[in-house]
Image (cartoon, helix red, strand yellow):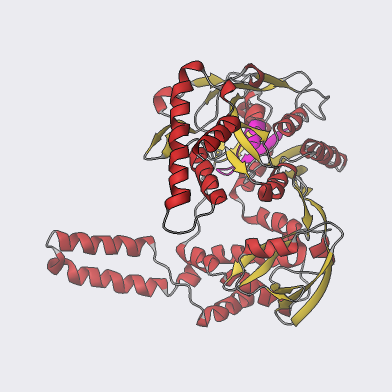
């Protein structure tokens, strides 16, 4: 058995690819692995599953590298295909779990869930008569997905209407990379880009042409929370705004075929229109190529927060038995020459990658001579710090009270005004406070934690008897203050409620449009695009 496993592993890893000096070390460790596997498989006290053992070994090996190098079993092929193509067969809706049930969160307009009249907040009771109570969201997803053209009966519960049954026919779902575009105000065209699956470049190109045709004189491309995708689509998107023949990305890897230069190949749509890119800490990979390249070429001003910092390129390798793996094969460098990778996976401390050392970071120049730095992701030209949600807001969201109140609101209001005109009135907010009367949402504020730490330190230093009265006074004052948190944080909670409620009526468009009023990034964008001198200064003109 050991010889069989050893030969199998040799075949899988392909010794022809190893350097000669590594041969002994590799063969020794494969021999050790075969011995360990044999002993566990034959002598372990409980029954083991060979496939699960090998999978755990593969996952453990890849985990020692970076989080982007992954193995996909035959059963996971569909999930990986969706990551790459944005296409699957199902109903077209996100879901969320609350207690024992899965709920519809956001149907995508034009797809089966939307066509069947499903609404955010619908509780999924059964699929084709099979009870969904207690099932995980991943399990319910498997029931909802299936071959395009197949149908099923969905039993759900809707607040205000009770139990409903919907017949739904699955379709091939291709999520748009540009779910929203529009002229918001002051001749500013806005494009929300959420992915880099096939046709992303065409979708952005078409959106720019459409907005210009409707009178847009300035453009905003929103890449916030866009985790990236296909490299060539990033090149195509940059190409919308820069001429043919520009070098956008250079990749460098271990093998010659991984060392490539990617240039724009098409005629642009507009190389002059003022352009602002929105980024944040969840803008990664292809989003960083687009934003970084346009910054390096002084073609756009970046607003927001430092991007994620993923400068690694993955290649898909097809393996035997319909399995595959995604493996990091190169690093990419944008036009200024900088590498934006933030974490050094080659140097881990206690198994965790550490940030690139400051001593190794280098300064670069954009085309017009502006200073930029590598090793930190993409840094915006205008940095905006956004305050985190208050503890009470986080507790209400975490316990799904905002979601459930929005369901209640929708059950009592069949329609509402357009997103940009929608506001939470005092009467609605009072209803929300009443709704929370018997709800649990315990939370601990930072101040309470500080008081608790003070008490612990006082006891440790033998000062507690001296300070106990003062600490008790602080705790009493804090408890009294917390009772007013729904008043003290009213404006923040109103914004959260507006966002959640408007989704019940206008879906993706509602989510985008309702956010403009209270978005600090958007406020700065409007200010910037109204000041041509400031804009030109920032891009080095």
Residue sitting at x 35%, y 62%: 447
As drawn, 433 above or below 180: below
Query: What residue range appears in magenta?
Result: 274-291
The image position of residue 309, as x and y in percent, is 54, 35
User: Image check: 366 left or right of 452?
Assistant: right
User: Image check: 367 left or right of 390?
Assistant: right
Instruction: Give 112 or 376, whichever is nearer the viewer.
Output: 112
Q: How many numbered dots are placed on residues in this image?
A: 0
Determine which quarter of the picture holds residue 508.
Answer: bottom right
| Magenta stretch holds residue 195 | no
Examine the rendering and report whether any part of residue 541 can be seen. no
User: Image check: 237 left or right of 494?
Assistant: right
Instruction: Give 143 or 380, whichever is nearer the viewer.
Output: 143
The image position of residue 188, as x and y in percent, is 75, 43
Examine the rendering and report whether any part of residue 334 can be seen. yes
As drawn, 396 above or below 110: below
User: Image check: 505 left or right of 423?
Assistant: right
Residue sitting at x 47%, y 44%: 38
The image position of residue 373, as x and y in percent, is 51, 26
Residue sitting at x 44%, y 32%: 29
Instruction: Give 382 or 351, whichever is nearer the viewer.
Output: 351
Instruction: Give 360 or 139, whichever is nearer the viewer.
Output: 139
Quarter of the rendering occupied by the C terminus:
top right
The image position of residue 442, as x and y in percent, is 44, 72
Determine which quarter of the picture holds residue 415.
Answer: bottom right
| Magenta stretch holds residue 288 | yes
């Amino acid at each position: 058995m050991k010889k069989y496993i050893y030969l199998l592993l040799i075949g899988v890893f392909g010794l022809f690819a190893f350097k000669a000096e590594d041969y002994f070390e590799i063969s020794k460790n494969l021999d050790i692995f075969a011995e360990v596997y044999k002993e566990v498989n034959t002598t372990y006290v409980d029954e083991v599953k060979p496939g699960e053992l090998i999978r755990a070994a593969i996952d453990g090996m890849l985990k020692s590298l970076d989080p982007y190098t992954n193995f996909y079993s035959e059963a996971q092929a569909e999930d990986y295909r969706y990551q790459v193509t944005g296409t699957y067969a199902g109903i077209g809706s996100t879901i969320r779990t609350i207690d024992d049930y899965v709920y519809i969160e956001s149907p995508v307009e034009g797809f089966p869930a939307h066509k069947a009249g499903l609404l955010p907040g619908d509780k999924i009771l059964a699929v084709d008569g099979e009870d969904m109570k207690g099932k995980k969201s991943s399990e319910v997803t498997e029931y909802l997905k299936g071959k395009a053209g197949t149908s099923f009966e969905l039993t759900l519960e809707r607040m205000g209407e009770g139990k409903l049954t919907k017949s739904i026919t699955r379709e091939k779902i291709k999520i748009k990379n540009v779910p929203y575009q529009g002229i918001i105000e002051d001749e500013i065209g806005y494009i929300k880009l959420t992915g880099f699956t096939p046709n992303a470049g065409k979708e952005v190109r078409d959106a720019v042409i459409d907005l210009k045709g409707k009178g847009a004189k300035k453009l905003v491309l929103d890449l916030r929370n866009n985790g990236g995708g296909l490299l060539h689509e990033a090149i195509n998107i940059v190409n919308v705004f820069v001429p043919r023949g520009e070098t956008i990305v250079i990749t460098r890897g271990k093998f010659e075929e991984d060392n490539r230069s990617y240039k724009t190949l098409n005629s642009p749509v507009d190389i002059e229109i003022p352009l602002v890119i929105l980024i944040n800490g969840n803008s990664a990979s292809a989003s960083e190529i687009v934003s970084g390249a346009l910054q390096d070429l002084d073609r756009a001003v970046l607003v927001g927060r430092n991007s994620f910092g993923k400068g690694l390129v993955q290649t898909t390798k097809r393996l035997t038995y319909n399995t595959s793996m995604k493996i990091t094969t190169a690093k990419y460098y944008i036009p200024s020459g900088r590498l934006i990778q933030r974490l050094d996976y080659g140097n881990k401390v206690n198994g965790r990658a550490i940030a690139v050392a400051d001593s190794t970071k280098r300064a670069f120049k954009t085309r017009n001579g502006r200073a930029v730095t590598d090793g930190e992701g993409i840094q915006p030209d205008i940095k905006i710090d956004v305050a985190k949600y208050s503890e009470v807001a986080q507790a209400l969201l975490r316990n799904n009270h905002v979601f459930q109140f929005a369901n209640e609101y929708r059950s009592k209001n069949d329609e509402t005004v357009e997103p940009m005109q929608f506001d939470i009135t005092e009467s609605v907010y009072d209803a929300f406070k009443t709704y929370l009367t018997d709800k649990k949402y315990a939370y601990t504020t930072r101040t309470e934690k500080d008081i608790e730490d003070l008490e612990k330190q006082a006891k440790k230093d033998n000062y507690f008897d001296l300070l106990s009265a003062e600490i008790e006074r602080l705790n009493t004052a804090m408890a009294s203050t917390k009772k007013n948190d729904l008043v003290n944080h009213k404006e923040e909670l109103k914004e959260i409620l507006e966002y959640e409620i408007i989704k019940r009526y206008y879906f993706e468009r509602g989510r985008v449009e309702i956010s403009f009023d209270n978005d600090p990034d958007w406020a700065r964008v409007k200010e910037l695009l109204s000041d041509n001198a400031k804009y030109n200064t920032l891009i080095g003109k």
